[in-house]
Amino acid sequence: MSILSIATIDVDLTDASPYLSAAQIAQHFNIEATKINHILRDLKWIEKEYDIWWIATVLGKKNGAIEQTHANDKIKYVHWSKEILENEELNLAIQRYIHTYKNDRAYKNFIAKHYLDQGYTLWNHTEDKGLDDKNINYIAKKNREIILINCRGNPTDITIKEIKIFEQQKEAFILENPIFADYNVKLLYNMSGFFLTEEAFWYIQEHSRTISYQILK
């Protein structure tokens, strides 16, 4: 039976098994388990069903994916043939991720030093909250000014959709921290280059009292 024709089966994930979970793939490449599904999604090998669980796409099945449905709760899982570890496309995608991660980490450290040197008190919001891929990387405070900072060290576009999510996170931050309700709370993109889409640029111009950007490198 070919892998493509396998539907829902009980998968043995012991060392002797020919199948791997996403967590085991992540462990093999020494990256965060939460990241491997993002990489597989970007490759269009998996996609979300009902915004709840991952399912394999046709392309994913061609690259060794099989689906399992848990007998009790009917939750679906995707597992992979061990041959995926040698897949050239996956290996290149993971190398790109590692390179991007290192650049992002270096840029965030650079931005942190920039604000500390200016006398701001700085919180690492991502690490404090255990968040990943969120807009607010740092919270900087000086006197009665609060800056919610997004660090963009890699050239990925900033869209209006992302900006509006950033604005929603600002409102949530104020609700969670009412002590800052009377402070001047602003949103700021720190970028290593100009990464705004044209629409995002004009949106920021129109809302410059509450959101801005600067290029620091």
Image (cartoon, helix red, strand yellow):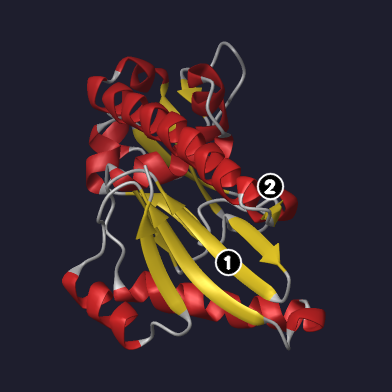
* Residue 123 image position (x, y, % from top left): 71, 54
- Image: 187 above or below 48: below
- Image: 172 above or below 28: below
- Mark in front: 2 vs 1: 1
Judging depth in this view, the residue of 60 and 119 nearest the camera is 119
Quick check: can you spot residue 1?
Answer: no
* Residue 80 image position (x, y, % from top left): 42, 30
Label 2, label 1: how far apart the Cα atoms are:
14 Å
Judging depth in this view, the residue of 203 and 92 nearest the camera is 203
> In which quadrant of the rendered view does residue 47 lie?
bottom left
Label 2: few (<14), some (14–19) or many (≥20) C-alpha neighbours in 10 Å: few
Quick check: can you spot residue 111?
Answer: yes
Instruction: Determine which of the numbered discs, if any, sits on residue 148 in the image.
Output: 1
The C terminus sits in image quarter:
top left
Contact flag, marks 2 and 1 (Cβ < 8 Å): no
* Residue 36 image position (x, y, % from top left): 46, 37
Disc 2 target residue: 127
The residue at the point 24 percent across, 20 percent down is: 88
Q: What's the residue type where badge 1 is placed?
A: Leu
The residue at the point 59 percent across, 12 percent down is: 15
